[in-house]
């Protein structure tokens, strides 16, 4: 038997009494030790000691407000009859940009439930609370990475690429010629490098792919770089380094490395250079330096294999890839970001200026008309007046106008976020259709375009 009070899900006072003595609520400070214990147990099976305190430390920083993307108290839990936390998920801020336009987002993270209480729907109830609080604070999207298929159950769709890159064997790293000095050096970044890191990151996330700039990217500020540079006992995945000229010490590039090497592979997650420095110039020195770092950095535990591979996880495209593909390498296909959009007309209204620019640069410049898109459960109305756009919910049968296109629920998010074109989607989904007049218009508004959404843990 479930008892639900008349209090909004996002309210800190919300509680729901579930069957068998379990309670759904927002966590308080008194729950911290129990939350730590849950995370240490659930994420400890991969650790030699059977406990992984790093995940618990990370969660403590996020909900305690010391993480730059955390908000105190944003963690939903289920407790048992002894008030022990048996399931939990926290909510982080997720600042992103779409075609240069800021979008406020939320990111559920560290999803955990005790093995003894799984398959009772607790995570589903927790996600309803997380979504309610995220929307209440103004988030237009939620994003999460993780288990294949699982988060589709909660209204998410794979709509952005995650990762992808090339693995380079140590055997393929070019040797330094005898008597030659390294033309570039690397070191961990310090707080004095933050301005250079910001400028290099902006250069990296605004570079073009297929003659188009990156569509969606993470917004990183000085506070986050300061946090990433600091020493930590949590599980944040990367730390920034800089590339310098040994003679002058000038910073000419930057990259991010895994903080701990979990296997025989060292991961590099971002790489950018100043405009006057060619990637081909720094490649030999960089790979030799990464090889040396990989053999010296902390490892997961005593079972970790010796390093023998570098992995450049820089997305679907990067200027260094042609240099890697000339050598012994292996390509790793990207995974995907799960994206949830609770109010599609509201999100599209936020990014309307970017969509209007696309329209103005297409054969539909100055377009006036309406397009009704059917999602089989609800739909979307696009209203254009001399190239200016508005958006509204639409339901088939709600007015006299028929649908102009149809997509299965959520699939259009892949097109809106540039992951697939309408033509590619039609190849994969027989139940996507559009009129001859509508198809090129939808392609003009939502073309295929690469993104690079760096995870900010």
Image (tube, rainbow, N blue to C red):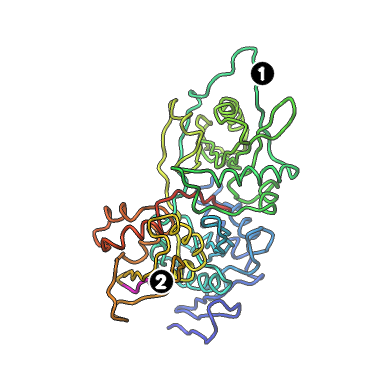
Q: Is-magenta flag for residue 427?
A: no
Q: Of helix, strand and loop, which one carries label 2?
A: strand
Residue 131: percent from left, percent from top = 50, 70
- Give the residues drawn in magenta, as a range: 377-385
Of residues 351 and 250, the one nearer the viewer is: 351
Of the 4 image quadrants, the one containing the N terminus is: bottom left
Pick whichever of labels 2 and 1 is earlier in the sequence.
Answer: 1
Residue 40: percent from left, percent from top = 57, 56
Query: Badge 1 local density, few (<14 within 10 Å), some, or many (20+)?
Result: few
- The answer for how far apart the CA atoms under marks 2 and 1 are is 63 Å
> Which residue is depicted at the point 60% across and 71% down?
27
Of residues 283 and 30, the one nearer the viewer is: 283
> Which residue is depicted at the point 40% across and 52% down?
419
Of residues 407 and 324, the one nearer the viewer is: 407
- Residue 45 versus residue 413 in the image, above or below: above
> Which residue is depicted at the point 49% across and 38% down?
318
Q: To which residue does mark 1 refer? A: 181
Q: Residue 389's quadrant in the figure?
A: bottom left
The chief SS type of the magenta part is strand
The dot on residue 58 is none
Query: Badge 2 local density, few (<14 within 10 Å), some, or many (20+)?
Result: some
- Residue 123 versus residue 21 in the image, above or below: above
Identify the residue at the far left of this view: 430
Of residues 353 and 289, the one nearer the viewer is: 353
Q: Of helix, strand and loop, which one carries label 1?
A: loop
Q: Is-magenta flag for residue 382?
A: yes
Residue 28: percent from left, percent from top = 64, 72
Residue 52: percent from left, percent from top = 57, 51
Q: To which residue does mark 2 refer? A: 383
- Residue 156 versus residue 169 in the image, above or below: below
Identify the residue at the far bottom of this view: 6
């Amino acid at each position: 038997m479930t008892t639900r009070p008349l209090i909004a899900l996002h309210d800190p006072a919300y509680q729901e009494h579930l069957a068998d003595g379990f309670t759904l609520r927002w966590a308080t400070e008194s729950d911290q030790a129990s939350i730590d214990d849950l995370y240490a147990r659930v994420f400890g099976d991969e650790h030699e000691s059977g406990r992984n305190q790093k995940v618990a430390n990370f969660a403590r920083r996020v909900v305690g407000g010391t993480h730059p993307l955390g908000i105190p108290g944003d963690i939903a839990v289920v407790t048992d009859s002894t008030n022990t936390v048996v399931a939990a998920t926290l909510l982080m801020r997720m600042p992103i940009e779409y075609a240069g336009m800021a979008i406020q987002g939320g990111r559920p993270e560290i999803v955990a439930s005790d093995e003894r209480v799984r398959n009772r729907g607790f995570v589903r109830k927790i996600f309803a609370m997380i979504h309610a609080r995220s929307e209440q604070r103004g988030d237009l999207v939620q994003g999460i990475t993780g288990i294949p298929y699982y988060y589709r159950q909660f209204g998410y769709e794979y709509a952005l690429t995650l990762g992808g890159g090339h693995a380079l064997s140590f055997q393929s790293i070019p040797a330094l010629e005898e008597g030659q000095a390294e033309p570039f050096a690397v070191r961990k970044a310090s707080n004095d490098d933050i301005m250079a890191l910001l400028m290099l990151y902006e250069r990296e996330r605004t570079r073009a792919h297929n003659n188009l700039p990156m569509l969606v990217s993470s917004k990183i500020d000085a506070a986050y770089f300061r946090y990433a540079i600091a020493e930590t006992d949590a599980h944040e995945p990367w730390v920034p380094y800089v590339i310098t000229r040994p003679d002058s010490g000038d910073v000419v590039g930057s990259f991010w490395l895994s903080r701990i090497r979990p296997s025989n592979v060292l991961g590099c997650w971002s790489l950018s250079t100043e405009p006057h420095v060619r990637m081909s110039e720094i490649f030999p020195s960089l790979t030799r330096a990464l090889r040396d770092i990989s053999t010296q950095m902390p490892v997961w535990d005593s079972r970790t294999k010796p390093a023998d591979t570098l992995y450049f996880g820089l997305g679907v495209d990067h200027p260094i890839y042609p240099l890697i593909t000339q050598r012994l390498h292996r390509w790793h296909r990207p995974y995907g970001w799960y994206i949830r959009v609770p109010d599609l007309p509201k999100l599209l209204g936020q990014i309307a200026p970017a969509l209007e620019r696309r329209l103005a640069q297409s054969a539909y410049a100055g377009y006036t008309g309406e397009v009704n898109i059917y999602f089989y459960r609800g739909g979307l109305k696009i209203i254009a007046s001399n190239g200016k756009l508005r958006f509204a919910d639409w339901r088939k049968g709600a007015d006299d106008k028929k649908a102009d296109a149809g997509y299965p629920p959520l699939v259009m998010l892949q097109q809106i976020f540039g992951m697939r074109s309408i033509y590619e989607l039609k190849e994969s989904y027989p139940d996507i259709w559009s009129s001859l007049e509508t198809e090129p218009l939808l392609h003009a508004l939502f073309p295929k375009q690469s993104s690079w959404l760096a995870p900010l843990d």
